[in-house]
Image (tube, rainbow, N blue to C red):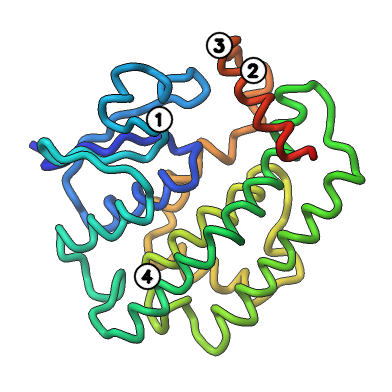
Amino acid sequence: MADITLFLDLMSQPCRSVYILAKANNIPFTNHGVLLFKGEHLSEEFGKVNPLRKVPALKDGDFTMAESTAILLYLANKYKTPDHWYPADLQKRARVDEYLAWQHTNTRPHGSKLFWLKVMTPFLLGHEAEPEKLEPVVAEFNTTLTTIEQQFLAGKPFIAGDKISIADLVAIVEIMQPVAGGFDAFENRSKLADWKKRVEEAIGAELFQEAHEKILRVKEMQNMPIPPELKERLKARLQQFNR
């Protein structure tokens, strides 16, 4: 019997990072699906696990927690994953922590905004995002990708050094989100493309594909019905990106 339960929807990039770490390290867990586009994260039942109503979430006996980066570190520590995931060496660990801190105001919001404009605009409003709104968002995300190439991957195969770490997982799932929306993040970026290939090889191509299969088919959801209340919530969030 699994020790823990993970509440996940692989449409979510933070959920994918948690899923990949757990699967790559043979961590025993029960995968409790929470379908975001059916509003299951808003249910009273899920609210008992995570009052913030967000995935991923973790339940370990009577202990529950939210926030993907915290969950990743909890899993790495509890199950004593190989050192490269979250190194014992102070400076290598600091490189992981540095990226995790930086990405909260860079890779994550910029990639998410691009995904919402390219995918959620036609899904919710029935038309493509206006070029004048899309172009600065693309530029912003490209700046983020350049920083990852020139700073975080400078002279190293992975963000924290010679081997894959939690930082690489968090980075790749965020970059793959706009990729799923039709933005080629790796075009004319050989360093970033080579890093992606190394990440895939490190975790296994099959697991990488399994984790991303759902988001890579995101355009199939265009005709999917969603609860009216949830649709209004999503439209309100989309308006924030359109300002």
Image-quadrant location for residue 195: bottom right
Number of labels in the image equals: 4
Q: Which mark is residue 227?
A: 3
Q: Between marks 3 and 4, how big is the CA–CA gap?
A: 38 Å
Give the label, 1 or 3, closer to the camera: 1
Mark toward the start of the polypeptide (2 vs 1):
1
Give the label, 1 or 4, closer to the camera: 1
Q: Between marks 1 and 3, how big is the CA–CA gap?
A: 16 Å
Q: Of the residues shown, which amino acid type is indicated by label 2?
A: Glu
Residue under label 4, please give it: 165
User: In the image as oriented, which residue stretches furthest toward the right?
Assistant: 132
In percent of width and height, residue 81 lies at: 20, 65
User: In the image as oriented, which residue stretches furthest toward the left?
Assistant: 1
Q: Of the residues shown, which amino acid type is indicated by label 1?
A: Arg
Which quarter of the figure is the N terminus placed in? top left
Mark toward the start of the polypeptide (1 vs 3):
1
Residue in the picture at 47% in, 77% down: 158
Q: Which mark is residue 232?
A: 2
Residue in the picture at 91% in, 46% down: 132
Mark toward the start of the polypeptide (3 vs 2):
3
